[in-house]
Image (cartoon, rainbow, N blue to C red):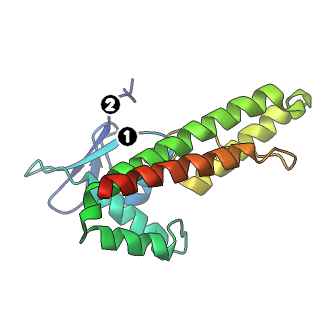
Amino acid sequence: MVDTEKPLLIKRYASRRLYNTETSDYVTLEDIATFIRDGREVQIVDLKSGDDLTRQYLLQIIAEHESRGESVLPVDVLTDLVRSYTSSASTIVPQFLAASFEMLRESQSKMMENMSMTNPMTKVPGFEALQAQQAAFFKAMTGGMMNGSSGPEMETGEAPSDLDQIKKQLAELQAQLLKMGK
């Protein structure tokens, strides 16, 4: 039985091959990306030195997806990230990004909860299958960055109040970060 609570341990051999310790086989970067999209935490360590290489490989996965035209990060965001490495913002950028993704996950969860309670479509036969299909599509589009929560199935008649609330929360967070940076 696989313990999905613990991170999946991947060992990098001197040959740079990646070895899945749970299944006792070699894996590729795309395999690792799939594990992550499926909601699994991954830890990659160098077999000889024991160094944690997880960050390095995650960045490599992102770079490969971006280079194949699967652009998620706009150029201005990438530019700001590069700038943050050489400025005093480098101390608050990780906190800002973590808080932003947490707000996104919470908002998505609330939206899904509201959809299931107030949406008359939930009574239509086959709606659950459609909802599951949309969730899988959203998960694929976001690369699973929502930690396994199902995606938002926005209806065309949905009130914009959720989006307005998210924008307001993001603006408040940005204001707080600006105050911290001064």
Looking at the rendered structure, the number of numbered marks drawn on it comes to 2
**At which x and y percent is residue 53?**
22, 54
Q: How far apart are marks 1 and 2 (CA)?
A: 7 Å
Q: At label 2, which amino acid type do we have?
A: Lys
In the image, what residue type sits under mark 1?
A: Glu
Whether residues under marks 1 and 2 lie with C-beta atoms below 8 angstroms apart, the answer is: yes
- As drawn, the label of residue 143 is none
Helix, strand or loop at label 1? It is loop
Residue placed at 60% from the left, 49% from the top? Answer: 168
- From the top left corner, tell me how far across and down residue 34 is, in percent: 47, 50
Badge 1: residue crowd in 10 Å (few <14, some 14–19, many ≥20): some
Residue 178 figure quarter: bottom left
Q: Nearer the viewer, residue 33 or 13?
A: 33
Q: Which residue is drawn at 36% across and 26% down?
A: 3
* Nearest to N terminus: mark 1 or mark 2: 2
Residue located beneath label 2 in the image: 6
Tell me the quarter of the picture where residue 159 sits: top right
Report which residue position mark 1 lands on.
41
Tell me, yes or no, if residue 27 can be seen here: no
Residue 98: x percent and y percent? 40, 47
